[in-house]
Image (spheres, helix red, strand yellow):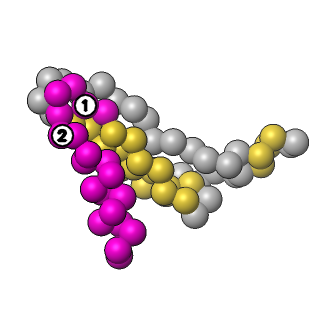
Amino acid sequence: MTNFGVLRMPNRFGDLVVEKMWAPALRSVPGQDVLAAATFDGGLSLVHTRVAGTEGLLARMVEILDTE
């Protein structure tokens, strides 16, 4: 699990509005999962990468977070 935490950046740059900031998608090795998290402007983003890793892991994490 990687966690960039709360990204403290402006959500506007002139006319450009940043709606979402994604956590980095890191390359995993066979049999391992990488979950990356970042929070920006009050929203959480999660990215799951895997090579023969756990099917459905990201969906399960979202399920757990939705119950909190």
User: Counting other residues with Cα less than 10 Å from the Cα at mark 2, is it few (<14), some (14-19), or many (20 or more)?
Assistant: some
Instruction: Check disc 1 and report its element: helix, strand or loop.
Output: strand
Above-or-below relation of 59 to 16: below
The kind of residue tagged 1 is Arg
Q: Residue 1's spot in the image, x, y percent?
A: 26, 46
Taking the spot 30% from the left edge, 43% from the top edge, the residue there is: 35
Cβ atoms under marks 2 and 1 closer than 8 Å: yes
Q: Residue 54 carries which label?
A: 2
The kind of residue tagged 2 is Thr
Disc 2 from disc 1: Cα separation:
7 Å
Q: Residue 28's spot in the image, x, y percent?
A: 24, 27
**Residue 2 appears in the figure:** no
| Horizontal side of residue 7 vs 61, given as left or right | right
Q: Residue 14 falls in which quadrant of the image?
A: top right
Q: Which mark is residue 50?
A: 1
Q: What stretch is highlighted in magenta?
A: 49-68
Above-or-below relation of 22 to 61: above
Give the number of callouts. 2
Above-or-below relation of 62 to 46: below
| Horizontal side of residue 59 vs 45, given as left or right | left
User: Counting other residues with Cα less than 10 Å from the Cα at mark 1, is it few (<14), some (14-19), or many (20 or more)?
Assistant: some
Does residue 52 show up magenta in the picture? Answer: yes
Q: Residue 55's spot in the image, x, y percent?
A: 22, 40
Taking the spot 17% from the left edge, 27% from the top edge, the residue there is: 52
Instruction: Check disc 2 and report its element: helix, strand or loop.
Output: loop
Q: Residue 41's spot in the image, x, y percent?
A: 62, 59
Q: Which mark is residue 41?
A: none
